[in-house]
Amino acid sequence: MITATPPSCNDASIAPFIPTTADPWNTTKVTHAYRRLGFGASQQTIDAALAMSPGDFIDMLVDTAFNLPTTPAPPWGYYSYNDFTDYENQNFPFFNEWRIQTVNDFMNEDLRGRMTFFWMNHFVTEFETYGHSPYAFQYYNTMQFNCVGNFKQFVRAVGVNSTMLIYLNGFQNTQFDPNENFARELFELFTLGEGNGYTQEDIVETARALTGYNHWNDYGDIIYFDPSTFDSGEKTIFGQTGEWGYDDVINLLFQERGEEIAFYICEKLYRFFVSPAVDAVIEQDIIQPLVDTFINNDFEIVPVLKQLFKSEHFFNERALGVTVKSPYDVILAYLKETGFYYDDELIETIVYYNSLMGQDIYDPPDVSGWQRDETWINSSTLTGRWQLVDLYIWFLFDQNEFTLTDLARDLTNDSIDPNYITQVLVDHFMAKPLHSPLDYTIATDIFKWDVPQNYYDEGLWNLSWSSAPYQVLLLLQHIGKMPEFQLK
């Protein structure tokens, strides 16, 4: 059974983590950070981070994410329908091409990739609804550009993004026929949380203020504001009356409900990056200081991330292994932490298999997104995780079996001790050590395979043996099926 450590057991503070002899800065903590803030890292990258202080390390990750330029637009990124030479046969291949680019970004950009994916599950859209590949790019570009920027400006940009205007019916919202869909989700899912600080009347009046964004020059083009369909009458929102328009709504929202927004977003960041459950102590001692930081910095995201990720709380031992990996966590971290071969064709295969396991990139199940954590695991998806790892290992074995032993050599300094090799390889993929010595013994016996014990006892066996690649394969398969492997 896959379970996580109760999150309330983590009683460490929001104060910055300072290494001590009893609680050192080590590989476990760096690996934890890379798995939570990115999709894992190579041993070489982890070793480099160990030479930095924890604070400098987090500054490096966050500042790099902030300063990265956005991924360049593909040639078709702003096409309208008539710009395609053959829409029927080009649209989905372009979209598929962009999905592959997106996954490569997630894996290679560390925190920027992770934050982009996080917000794609917050400001949700579904490709099956809008179905236009340039809109998928434009949506992604908005997520990527704003993911570690100013949250107020992020919200402002999302509402007039053509993809969102199509998905939540904003393009149908006119003075003649107001559509409340986006207004409702703006409050309920994007900024305040369900039933928190708004009324049905606020939704109705906000929908009126959001009218007018429904004009395009050609189908699939960027949607822009049309004054002739805007409701210019007075509206009362959060008790404030005026001839409010789109920008006024965003300003009023953050002016009148800033505390609620800050708490909702900081709690969501905490649940995603630290632990999926929150109690009253966590709310008071961890989330509220983040809320104060968010508000005091005019909703800039970077100061909140730095405060949380530098904290004793984030690096506490009880923060390890308390969340269930998503399908993308499983395989992307595997690629990065092994250094094994992959290409765009393999990424396309991963996109397909992950969709079968419930994480169809650009197509969450509904506007509320993936609910994550334990919802990722059931009898069929767990088997699918095992099968994906198995298929990948066998693919590598068939291509070049020594790829597997190269990993073992690199991590163990070419050891000939099967017990040591097993423990190092197991620990390399786990958030924390296994529960008991017996678990390591079982794994070691699997790794030893059919090689007679005396060959190990007499030091005759080594990783150059012809059986060694298959032995490593068996161990990697076993590791991939461990319950602990599903946690990060």
Image (cartoon, helix red, strand yellow):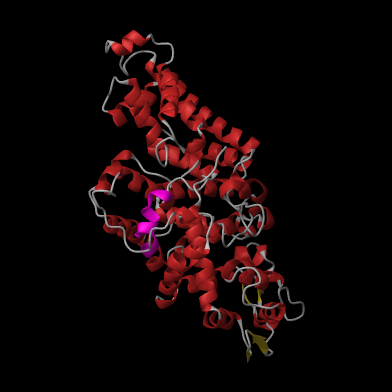
Residue at 51% x, 39% y is 486
- Give x and y (percent) for residue 480: 49, 32
Depth order, front residue of 451/157: 451
Residue at 44% x, 28% y is 439
Specify the segment rendered in magenta: 306-318
Q: Is residue 321 left or right of residue 215?
A: left
Residue at 46% x, 66% y is 287
Q: Quadrant of residue 158?
A: bottom right
Q: Is residue 398 above or below residue 2?
A: above
Depth order, front residue of 159/198: 198
Residue at 51% x, 64% y is 267
> Does the magenta-highlighted stretch encompass residue 311?
yes
Depth order, front residue of 92/400: 400
Depth order, front residue of 40/216: 40
> Does the magenta-highlighted stretch encompass residue 151?
no
Residue 127 showing in the rendered view: yes
